[in-house]
Amino acid sequence: MNTRKMGVVMLLMMIVVMGAALSGCSSNPNKQDIGTVSGAVVGGVVGSALTGSTLGTVAGAGAGAYVGNRIGHQLDRK
């Protein structure tokens, strides 16, 4: 399996795991939760596109999750 396919598989696995984790948190996710998941997805896709490696996908997902979390937190405070 080439690294590009592994990156896509890892990204899909992260989406499933994060979705399952968030569904157990509450019935109505807040903006911070939504921002975290959305940021992770977007960051993972961008990281994979820029680097073409699994490490880039994971790093992008982590960075995106952090940024999305912080933006969602600010939106929840308003």
Image (cartoon, grey):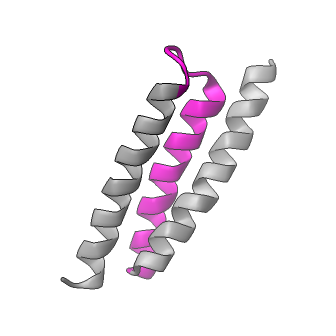
* Residue 44 vertical placement versus 48 (above, below): above
All told, the count of numbered labels is 0
Answer with left or right where residue 3 lies relative to residue 59.
Answer: left
Q: Position of residue 8 (x, y in %)?
A: 30, 65
Residue visible at 62% across and 26% down in the picture:
31
* Residue 21 vertical placement versus 57 (above, below): above
Residue visible at 55% across and 47% down in the picture:
39
Quarter-of-image position of residue 30:
top right
**Closer-to-camera residue (45/18):** 18
Q: Is residue 45 magenta?
A: yes
Which residue extends farthest left?
A: 1
Which residue extends farthest top?
A: 28
Prevailing secondary structure of the magenta residues? helix
Q: Is residue 54 magenta?
A: no
Residue visible at 40% across and 71% down in the picture:
49
Q: Position of residue 62 (x, y in %)?
A: 59, 60
Q: Quadrant of the N terminus?
A: bottom left
Residue visible at 60% across and 50% down in the picture:
65
Answer with left or right where residue 63 lies relative to residue 78.
Answer: left
Which residue extends farthest front?
A: 24
Q: Position of residue 3 (x, y in %)?
A: 30, 83
**Closer-to-camera residue (58/17):** 17
Q: Which residues are magenta?
A: 25-52
Quarter-of-image position of residue 69:
top right
